[in-house]
Image (tube, rainbow, N blue to C red):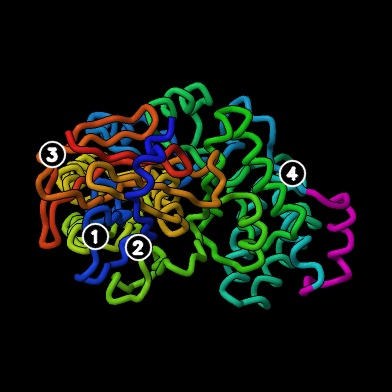
Amino acid sequence: MHLFTPYFKNYLLLISFLACAPLAKSQEIVGRTEICKWPQNKNGAVSITYDDGSINQFRYALPIMEQLKLPATFFIITRGIPGSQYHGRFIGRPVKEIITESASIPTNSQNFFERCSAAGYLGFKGTIVYHTKAAAMYDEGNHAEAFKVMDTLYRDVREGKFKPGYQPCDEVIQEKGSTWDDFRRDAARGYEFASHSVTHASMPALDSANIIYELEKSKEEIRNKLGARYTFSAEVPYGFEDNRVMKYAYKIYPALRNRMPEPWLKEIDRAGTQTPGNTDKDYVQWQRGATTKTPLPIMKSWVDTAASRTDTWLVLVIHGVDGIGYEALPHTLLRSYFEYIKSNEDKLWVATFGDVTKYMRERESENLSSQTDDRIIQVKLVNTLNSELYNVPLTLKTYIPAEWKFAFVYQGKYARTIKPLTDKNGSFVIYKALVNGRDIIITRR
């Protein structure tokens, strides 16, 4: 039954609000509602993310996070997990034709993507490193040097300098020991598993068909093994932000750690030397790569910076752990660091990459309205986002009459009695709300 009967409707005043936009002092404060920048009205957010899914991330780092009740996001390479349906492959014409052709036609801008896409699948071990090297050069704009790398590879293949077989990159090999059953168990504990492609391919040097295969089949594998909720986030390997690759990736995954082209978000990638600084954007995504060259005090200072601001999302990027993986960090250091993050949890929301993305997008797209009388405040949240994807509760702040000693807040099955807080504007309550759910009702208790 709708709470506002015809009797009450004569007393209602409809007020529309922009999220967190201040009202003039002369306007009535009671009923004013804001969407807090972060859940529980905290100062900032932290996401702990891991690349590659190397086994020691799960043997040594995850148990520490589980003890501390800290969530994290693992960007996994799906081909390296036993039982995966989709393995690395080249989408294109027979590789023997490409090898033969390379004897008479040098690598150039017309055939580079095809040759680099095929490089790991020529039927020989050790060729994938040429693909990786050439891709990095191409992404940096050194196209002529990248072409030379491909010419060297195909010449050495023609001259029989490689052993027959197939050898994946090291990142795939370092996943050995993990299983989909392990991931299902850890996902049930609140950890996010996300795509890092099928084979950890260097995508700026792939043609379109092979980019799409790496991204789509990894997503399909995760959906089949873990469920659709784990197909929200992805990281294109090596952190590449190539425009051509991003164009394809955006169509497949709602959120990319590589780049999020939101008009309200300032991005600083993990290679950047900037600090959040001054910005006219609502949010700052500040990526920092924790490596063996990063002293613990510097890593802690990142947390301090996020906690001292109100707009910063600190995204930590970790690779290897205890000797396995790129820039492997000892788990003893990670324990100290995670304990420090935990000690700042009163100021920082620690959440998965996907959940922080969802919260920000929900807040930025929300249409918020309120109705009030002297006994009831009714708040409505509506947006046009896909509610199956965007389902993270928002935190709202609503001003109530000063004489209310307690407020009763409910939305559907959510119901809670809350003791008000006060600021310079008056008395208010902080509470959670689901978007596109039932109206929120606040009454005196």
The residue depicted at 27 percent of the width and 48 percent of the height is 373
Q: How many marks?
A: 4
**164, above or below 347, in the image:** above
Real-space Cα separation, disc 3 to disc 1, in angstroms: 28 Å
Tag 2–tag 3 contact (CB < 8 Å): no
The residue mark sitting in front, 3 or 1, is 3
Real-space Cα separation, disc 2 to disc 4, in angstroms: 35 Å
What is the x, y in percent for residue 289?
A: 35, 58
> N-terminal of the two: label 2 or label 4?
4
Residue 177 visible: no
The residue mark sitting in front, 4 or 3, is 3
The answer to which of 326 and 210 lies nearer the viewer is 210
Q: Which mark is residue 419?
A: 3
Q: Which mark is residue 306?
A: 1
The residue depicted at 24 percent of the width and 67 percent of the height is 27
- Look at the image and give the residue range highlighted in magenta: 91-109
The answer to which of 74 and 80 lies nearer the viewer is 74
Q: Which mark is residue 89?
A: 4
What is the x, y in percent for residue 387?
A: 53, 42
What residue type is disc 4 on?
Answer: Arg
Real-space Cα separation, disc 4 to disc 3, in angstroms: 60 Å
Secondary structure beneath disc 2?
Answer: strand
What residue type is disc 3 on?
Answer: Lys
> N-terminal of the two: label 1 or label 4?
4
User: Which quadrant would residue 222 be assigned to in this image?
Assistant: top right
What is the x, y in percent for residue 77?
A: 55, 41
> N-terminal of the two: label 1 or label 2?
2
Reading the image, the residue beneath label 2 is: 286
What is the x, y in percent for residue 190?
A: 38, 31
